[in-house]
Amino acid sequence: MPERLVGVIGASGLVGECLLEALMAEGWNVAALSRNPDRTLGTPATWPVTWPPTWPATWHSAADEQLPQRELWISTAPIWLLPEYFERLVACGARRVVALSSTSRFSKAVSNDPVEQTLARQWQEGETALQSWATTHGIEWVILRPTLIYGRTDGNINAMIRFIRRFGFLPVLGKASGKRQPVRAADVARVCIAALTAPAARNQAYNIGGGETLTYREMAQRVFVAQDCRPRFLTIPVPLFNLTKPLSRLLPRRLRWLVAMMERMNKDLAFDDSQARRDLEYMPANFAPPMAKDVSK
């Protein structure tokens, strides 16, 4: 059986770490790229010694002028950074590139926050750049747009957990009835691998949700339970929130995320992922937030 070779851009991030584990467990030979390979998961030359040495993986700096020879590539880095690699991907013989984007390219495009509008534009422009470049060079592309990714080091569910454990409650806006589809980083990693070789995925973009759709309040209740805490919500009326919102700029920077999060609590951020389930045999798990002991400090 021929050796299966793959390159991973953004290998030291939340999804990247899950991806490396899954790829090597399936016997892939992985060339992992990181902007700081010496400070991530070991030396840039070898996978950490704590892992079975029979699983081949080599670390490379993202700044290297030449990429390892690979026909298949997965990028978990922000998609707007991918153009930095285009010339090198052509030179190394890339034939298919699987790249992560986000469903936020749609939801944040209609946000009132200029920062979120900029992010949405970056995701959209990154997707367009990948499609145009790949088409020009005869390279197959696959774009995966996850919804709310969670895992050991995510900035969403883990931030909620830390707030709950510190204050014992969670403020919510109105009914907090907006729909959510939290998806595990490990499930995103697995669908990336499926997209590497699935014939139907050629030049396709897929929305990737979690195994179930919950309201924001239901999602938060499950987070409370995972921390062995009784759900306690401080419900803020929408009119009062709108009246006091200008004062949010006085909050410490580490708490400003809460204001933007509250603004979205009653907005539906669920997407149809039936095409991914069909073409990629995508079967994500139901929402299971990490326990407190697993949360990054």
Image (cartoon, grey):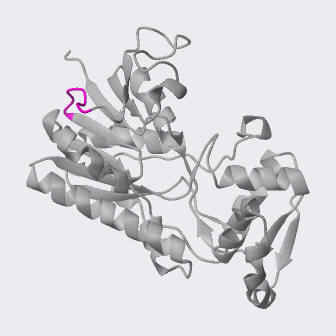
Residue at 34% across / 35% down in the picture?
63
Q: Is residue 140 magenta?
A: no
Q: Is residue 178 left or right of residue 9?
A: right
Q: Position of residue 231 (x, y in %)?
A: 86, 59
Q: Is residue 173 visible?
A: no
Q: Is residue 158 left or right of residue 282?
A: right
Q: Nearer the viewer, residue 287 or 107?
A: 107
Q: Is residue 55 left or right of residue 48?
A: left
Q: Position of residue 114 (x, y in %)?
A: 52, 77
Q: Position of residue 214 (x, y in %)?
A: 63, 64
Look at the image and tell me in which quarter the C terminus lies: top right
Look at the image and tell me in which quarter the N terminus lies: top left
Q: Is residue 112 left or right of residue 160?
A: left
Q: Quadrant of residue 264?
A: bottom right
Q: Position of residue 46 (x, y in %)?
A: 42, 15
Q: Is residue 79 visible?
A: yes
State the extent of the magenta-drawn residues as a range.
65-71
Query: Does 134 appear above or below 256?
Result: above
By secondary structure, the bulk of the magenta-drawn segment is best described as: loop
Q: How many marks?
A: 0
Residue at 55% across / 57% down in the picture?
148
Query: Does 248 appear above or below 164?
Result: below
Query: Does 143 appear above or below 21?
Result: below
Q: Quadrant of residue 179?
A: bottom right
Residue at 18% across / 37% down in the picture?
94
Residue at 54% across / 27% down in the picture?
39
